[in-house]
Amino acid sequence: MALAVMGLAGKGTFDHGVHPPERKGLAADAKIEVLPTPAMVKISLLQHVGAPCEAATKPRQEVAMGEMIGQSEAFISAPVHASIAGLAQLPGAVTLPNGRHVKAVGIKADGQQLAGDALYADVLGGDWPVSGLEQYAPGDIVAAVKQAGVVGQGGAAFPTYVKLTKNEAKPIDTILVNGCECEPYLTADYRLMVEAPEPVVTGALLAARACGASNVVIAIEDNKPLAVDTISKAARGTDVQVAELKTKYPQGGEKQTVQAALGKTIPGGGLPLDVGVVVINVGTAAAVARAVLRGKALTHRVITVTGDGVAKPKNILAPIGVSYGELIDYCGGLNADAVRVIAGGPMMGFTLGDLAAPVTKGTSGITVLTDNDVARITETNCVRCGRCVDVCPMNLVPTRIALASRNNDWALAKKYHITSCVECGCCAYTCPAGIPLVQLIRMGKAQLPRD
């Protein structure tokens, strides 16, 4: 159902980008299932942008679901909480999909657990009011979001309370809720919008109240008409607008969503707040509602397990800290031709080297690819075709940046704005020479000398 979105200046799309096969049909119709309580979770003390937390538990300490087990005094940080009830273990270390080794607290399941329909209702179900929210003071909303450890669930994992804190120097006029989910295969946000649109709308309204925004826009790509319909119905009687954007990758990037929905261009090196906008993911909005209205921490999230390499693609409500391997086992395990497991989607995800790695607040999906999916051409020299330039949504010259990184030419990499790359993968997707452009740029960012 196409909706006329009044008052929005965007054209429904952005410049450049690509149209990779969507492959969302594998899991789009799979209703959210609740993962049975795992025997053990390992909760990373760094699963957000900013300072890591320090463990707040002792070995053999009994903890309840939702109890804080890690915290930090730093401004840019977010506390972490127990996702199951049980006994805290001696703090150890885990390796995340991006290769970082971080401290973690293990919790061994013990005693009665909230599970099944009760857990689904606790996280997503029940009543979510869209009126009377003026009773919540902006400062109280921010405090509740901070206490709950809410971070961006679209992948960046930036502490949400920081975004919602009023900035007198840069006032916010619009909350933009990102429901585009442009990454191929993944359907976690889609199922959330279809099955539980109410907390998304409520959370968006609370977020707007917190930062003083007068406009609330929920952006959804037009390949998700059912989500557009359910969110629109949930928003009836409110001032929330639904922006139906044209399907194109990476429509879900902050700068691309702001341009497409609002017609505003974020300056190079800038942030959405520079143009009066705060962007949050639909899952983040639902977590905000749960934190403010129910005082509940971010302990679970919806994760898509999909791809031709997994037996039964599903969308799962899973506890933070469960291993990737357990989620795959719940989906029937790997097929015989599975060759690559990716944390996230195929465009921006990280290949997993160990299925024992724990999921974090920013884990949106697991994509399992087959040998046929990953067949690629042999890398050759750059043929100067310019395709990577034509598709780059950030208007960069990816091949120059990548080759500068490969040759450790940091002056050239900076000249071509390596730090502006969002690692969306459009360049690598179109490169006829098979150059691993994103990997080279990502490696260059990690090695880039600090000024």
Image (spheres, rainbow, N blue to C red):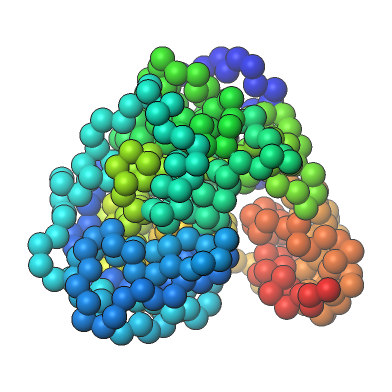
Viewer-nearest residue: 298 or 441: 298
Residue 72 in sight from this viewpoint: yes
Measuring from the top left, give residue 4's x and y in whole percent: 56, 15
Side (left or right) of 208 relative to 63: right
> Residue 221 location, x and y as percent?
53, 33
Residue 373 appearing in the image: no
Left or right: residue 210 compared with residue 197: right
**Residue at 36% over, 35% down:** 199
The front one of 293 and 84 is 293
Q: Position of residue 363 (x, y in %)?
A: 43, 59
Viewer-side residue, 277 vs 172: 172
Q: Quadrant of residue 375?
A: bottom right
Compare residues 315 and 429 and report the one nearer the observer.
315
Q: How many marks?
A: 0
Which residue is painted at 44% across and 42% down in the image? Answer: 140
At x 89%, y 72%, the residue is 411
Quadrant position of residue 328:
bottom left
Residue located at (79% from left, 75% from top): 450
Quadrant in the picture for the C terminus = bottom right
Image location (x, y in percent) of residue 33: 23, 49
Residue 300 lies, with reference to residue 249, above or below; the image says below
- Horizontal placement of 328 versus 217: left or right? left
Q: Residue furthest left?
A: 112
